[in-house]
Image: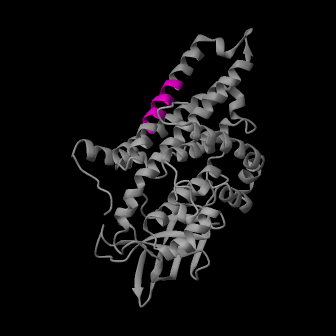
């Protein structure tokens, strides 16, 4: 592993986390994939081990570690062949908890962030709506202030942890006359009256609960506002950079897992008197796949370093997600082909991996949207700045 980025402490963490996943998670994966539900005990075990507090300050029970610990967390989760389980974990820690860490009041942090670190509460982030995915500013959900509370109406969709989470970080318009300056963020309790969730049946990510959420006159205490009213849009945009980098890291990790599996298979599979790894045509395709993975991985590590140094990497993170997710889909497609008929059989990992990977170019901003964002920065010299 590249010592430019990873220390001996990082390596020890990787070995420990990998061992934890093999002992505590892998034996249950097939059951969770089949049932579409991740049992609560594993969340508590993650909390007990400190895995939900990697980026959270010490005063809230976290470890306050650099982002390369997050890279290790993400990479190893991609290598147990359940994109749904991985998504449930990182969506809790790096979507919901990020907003609690950055925008929540002290009272809200004690009520929601601390138990999130402990794994006794699960969170989700609700931004995407049925009538507009990547068009965040065009959301229709509203939160009207009445006295000491807000009245929330609207709907969200494609929400990871949207059915079984304990709280929801919800974006809504608090000023319908404003496009970008009228959006606010709130913490909403799962048991709030008027909140309903419907589980969606997906192509992949079977272990995770992806939901469509409806809000019918849901009352939110005014103190559940995150940050300042009307600042929701820049808050969301600011954290999109880390989310997109996370998805880029996920992509290079699952592609690497697919390649490692295929190389092992080729060493054992014999055709025409020799193992598959001795056929030049196949060897050269492997060389191309490995090169593409390594290029994405090295780029993602360099962006992680800059993010850790406090740089605003929205362009680079967008490029990471755009290129890495496309690469992963293509590498995994080829990996399945290398297995021949076995690649199409569920007992082998490639069928699930292919389905799970396909969400990469969609979630967190589609590739088409990312291309336009990148084009604006590269061609039009547009600057995106972090929230003040």
- Residue drawn where x is 63% and y is 39% of the image: 12
Residue 359 in view in this figure: no
Using the image, determine if residue 154 lies above or below residue 116: below
In the image, 181 versus 310, the foreground residue is 310
Residue 97 on image: x %, y % = 52, 62
Check the image and name the residue furthest to the top.
Answer: 273
**Left-right relation of 320 to 73:** left
**Left-right relation of 135 to 35:** left
- Residue drawn where x is 54% and y is 47% of the image: 70
**Left-right relation of 187 to 312:** right
Q: Which residues make up the magenta segment?
A: 290-300
Total numbered labels: 0
**Left-right relation of 81 to 318:** right
Residue 100 in view in this figure: yes
Check the image and name the residue furthest to the bottom.
Answer: 147
- Residue drawn where x is 57% and y is 42% of the image: 72
In the image, 88 versus 226, the foreground residue is 226
Name the quadrant of the C terminus: bottom left
In the image, 9 versus 176, the foreground residue is 9
Indicate whether residue 178 is drawn in magenta.
no
Name the quadrant of the N terminus: top right
Residue 137 on image: x %, y % = 35, 64
Using the image, determine if residue 318 lies above or below residue 50: above
Residue 146, image quadrant:
bottom left
- Residue drawn where x is 50% and y is 68% of the image: 169
Overall secondary structure of the magenta stretch?
A: helix
Check the image and name the residue furthest to the left.
Answer: 380
Residue 79 on image: x %, y % = 64, 39
Residue 352 on image: x %, y % = 66, 42
């Amino acid at each position: 592993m590249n010592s430019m980025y990873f220390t001996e402490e990082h390596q020890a963490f990787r070995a420990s986390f990998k061992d934890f996943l093999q002992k505590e998670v892998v034996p249950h994966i097939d059951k969770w994939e089949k049932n579409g539900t991740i049992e609560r005990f594993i969340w508590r075990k993650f909390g007990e081990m400190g895995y939900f507090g990697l980026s959270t300050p010490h005063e809230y029970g976290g470890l306050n570690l650099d982002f390369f610990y997050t890279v290790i967390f993400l990479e190893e989760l991609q290598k147990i062949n359940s994109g749904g389980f991985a998504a449930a974990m990182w969506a809790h820690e790096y979507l919901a908890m990020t907003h609690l860490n950055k925008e929540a009041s002290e009272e809200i942090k004690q009520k929601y962030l601390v138990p999130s670190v402990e794994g006794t509460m699960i969170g989700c982030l609700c931004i995407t709506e049925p009538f507009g995915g990547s068009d965040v500013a065009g959301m229709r959900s509203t939160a009207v202030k009445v006295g000491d509370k807000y009245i929330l109406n609207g709907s969200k969709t494609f929400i990871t942890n949207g059915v079984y989470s304990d709280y929801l970080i919800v974006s809504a318009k608090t000023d319908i006359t404003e496009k970008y300056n009228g959006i606010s963020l709130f913490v909403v309790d799962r048991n709030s009256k008027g909140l309903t969730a419907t589980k969606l049946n997906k192509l992949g990510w079977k272990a995770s609960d992806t939901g469509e959420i409806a809000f019918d006159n849901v009352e939110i205490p005014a103190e559940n506002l995150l940050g300042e009213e009307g600042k929701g849009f820049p808050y969301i945009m600011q954290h999109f950079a880390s989310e997109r980098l996370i998805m880029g890291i996920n992509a290079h990790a699952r592609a690497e897992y697919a390649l490692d599996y295929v190389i092992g298979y080729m060493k054992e599979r014999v055709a025409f008197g020799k193992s598959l790894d001795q056929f030049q045509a196949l060897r050269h395709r492997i060389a191309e796949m490995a090169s593409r993975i390594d290029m994405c991985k090295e780029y993602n590590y360099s962006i992680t370093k800059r993010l850790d140094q406090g740089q605003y990497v929205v362009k680079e993170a967008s490029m990471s997600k755009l290129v890495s997710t496309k690469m992963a889909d293509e590498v995994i497609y080829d990996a399945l082909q290398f297995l021949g008929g076995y690649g199409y059989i569920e007992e082998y990992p490639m069928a699930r991996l292919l389905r799970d990977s396909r969400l990469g170019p969609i979630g967190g901003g589609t590739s088409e949207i990312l291309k336009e964002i990148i084009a604006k920065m590269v061609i039009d010299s547009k600057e995106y700045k972090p929230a003040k």
